[in-house]
Structures are given as C-alpha cells and as structure tokens.
Image (cartoon, grey):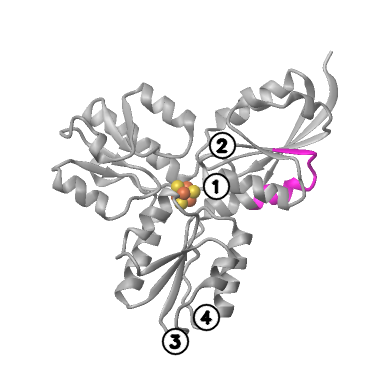
Amino acid sequence: MKNKDLKIYLAAPRGFCAGVDRAIEIVKKSINKFGSPVDVRHEIVHNKHVVENLKKIGAIFVEELSEIKDKTRPVIFSAHGVPKKVPKEAQDLKMEYIDATCPLVSKVHREAENLNKAGFHIFLIGHENHPEVVGTMGQIPEGSIKLVETIDDVEDIDIPSNKKLAFVTQTTLSVDDTKDIIDALKKKFPQIKEPNKEDICNATTNRQAAVKKIASKCDMFFVLGSRNSSNSVRLVEVARKAGCKNSQLMHSEKEIPFDEISNSKTIGISSGASAPEKLVQNLINQIKKDRKVSIEEIVVAEEKVIFKLPKELN
Ligand code: SF4
C-alpha cells in the first residue's frame, strides 16, 4: 500500500531552452551531414546526460582544438560561446567549424565589441572561469574588460570616475543577485552605461520566476541539472532564498533522498535549461512508487522562441 499523500508543484517553464535545443540539433545535424565522428569543443551544453547521448551517436568532446586528432573533420563550438582566438585558431588550422553559440550569448559578444570600439571600459558581471565568461572576455583586447563577481568586487574597483564605463552580464545569472551588483555599480559610477536590453536571458528569468512562485510552499525542492550548469545551480539558490531551505540539485533520479521525502507533504520540481524533461518524469515516476502523488504545474510564462540553425546546416 502506498503511504501518505504528496503534492508536487512542477515549475514551468523548466528544462531545455531555445539555445540548448538549437545547440543539440546542431550536433545531430552535423553528424547527419558530415558523418561521425564530429568533434565538439567543450560540452555542447552543461548536462552529462545530453553529452553521453551525443557521444553514442558519434560526437567527440574535447576542451581544445589541439586535442583533435583528425583535423579534416569539422568542429562545433559549444552553446556557451568562445573567445575570438578560437575561430581564428580553427582558420589557421584550416578546420571547418560550426558555431553553436546561443544567439543571446552572441548578442552580449557584439555588445562588448561595440562598447569597446566606442571607447568604453567594460565590466562583465559573471562567474570566473565559466566558459561563457571566458568567451565574452575574449571578444575584446585583454585589459579592456574587467570581471565583477560580487558587490565587494565593485567596492574594490579603482578606476577614474570620469572614464566612459559600461557593463554587460553573463546570461544565466541570478536576476536578484545581479540587480544588487548593478545597483552598486550605478551608485559608484552614476554615468555607467547599461545594456539596451537586459543580458540575462528570458529562459533564465522565466525559470527563476517559476521557482520563486513555488518554493515557499514546499518542504523540499529539487532542480534536475548537472553540477557545472550555471543556470541549474542558480535555480537551487533561488529556491532557497524564496523560502525552501531544503533545496537540492539532482543529477538524476538515482540520487533521490527517499528518507527525506518521506517526511515531506509538498515538494517542488524544476530543471535547468540544459536538462532533458525525461529526468523530471523519471524522478516523478520513482516518487510515485512510494507515495500517492498529485501534481500541479505552475506556469509563469510560455516560451515559443525557436532559433535558426547556422546556414551551413540549412
Ligand atoms: S540559457 Fe539563455 S543564453 Fe543560455 S542557451 Fe538558453 S537561451 Fe541561450
């Protein structure tokens, strides 16, 4: 007999965003077009399940072009974007490349480039060493863009206040934490120029808004996603801040803490922008084995965006 009722609040939107969909499609279509193997520089998106499935159909993942054995094969750049020196290196090596950078990351790249050309010193709000941050910083000469991770970093900035200043941000940050950093920047440098349209992407904003709406009602909150997925980690932080202290990142249903769940009446579930929906459904199916589950989906936005594939694959 199944014990106790359990209410599950399901956040929507959750899971794959348009940029992730496009990047995965680019790898699949490239394998179709060029045959396998096809090399991919860095994990195409930060999800182990996605990467393992693509390996099975012929993708090889490398961190640098120098690791690619057969340089006559095409290489794909991941959704996070690459510094300018990477396509240049591919050209020098006479390698064909296909760029799966999310168009919303490319938008930030162009912003940084244009600001640099217009003589602005740029601050990039983001997380050190994240590939998107490495890619954005690598669009313009070293020294003309400075990474800012925290409000303390803003306090430490030592730059003449009459300089032309601007900021851009990583696309997958916490909306609330970033607002605090932006406020600190604006307070210190009232003349600072901000992006015309916010750099944190809609997919990130929508997923965080859905989690925020649900978290305070939940005894536990699970976010399906890999540990290196920035937007998944942010969703866990958002759930905790919104009132569910016991919020956890979960790689797959194999990590379910059944003991803890047995003490819960209500749980929330979401998934990062790179996590397949199958992981959410697997988790729910596992929980259903033990509990009498009712599910309510809380939808805060509908996403209908589809990004075009690169012309090489059309
Ligand atoms: S999370 Fe946003 S920026 Fe990143 S791939 Fe998805 S749509 Fe693009």
Please state the horizontal and vertical placement of residue 178, each as a whole percent of the image: 58, 62
**Label 1, ligand 1: CB separation under 8 Å:** yes
Per the model, the C-alpha gap separating discs 3 and 2 is 43 Å
Magenta region: 209-221
- Label 4 packing within 10 angstroms: few (<14), some (14-19), many (20+): some
Can residue 305 be seen in the rendering of this structure?
A: no
Q: CA distance from mark 2 to mark 1?
A: 9 Å
Q: Nearer the viewer, mark 2 or mark 4?
A: 4
Q: Amino acid at mark 4?
A: Phe
Marks 4 and 3 sit apart, C-alpha to C-alpha, by: 9 Å
Q: Are marks 2 and 1 in contact (CB under 8 Å)?
A: yes
Q: Quadrant of residue 313?
A: top left
Q: Using the image as rendered, state which of residue 195 and residue 132 is in the foreground.
A: 132
Q: Earlier in the sequence, mark 4 or mark 3?
A: 3
Badge nearest the viewer, 3 or 2: 3
Residue 196 as seen in the image, left or right of residue 239: left
Q: Which mark is residue 189?
A: 4
Query: What residue is shown with label 3?
Result: 162
From this viewpoint, is residue 115 visible? yes
Residue pictured at 44% horizontal, 42% vertical: 20
Quadrant location of residue 246? top right
Assess disc 3: are there few (<14), some (14-19) or many (≥20) residues with their C-alpha within 10 Å of its C-alpha: few
Residue under label 2: 225
Residue at (23, 26) in percent of width and height = 35
Q: Is mark 2 within 8 Å of ligand 1?
A: no
Q: Is residue 66 magenta?
A: no
The mark nearer the N terminus, 2 or 1, is 2
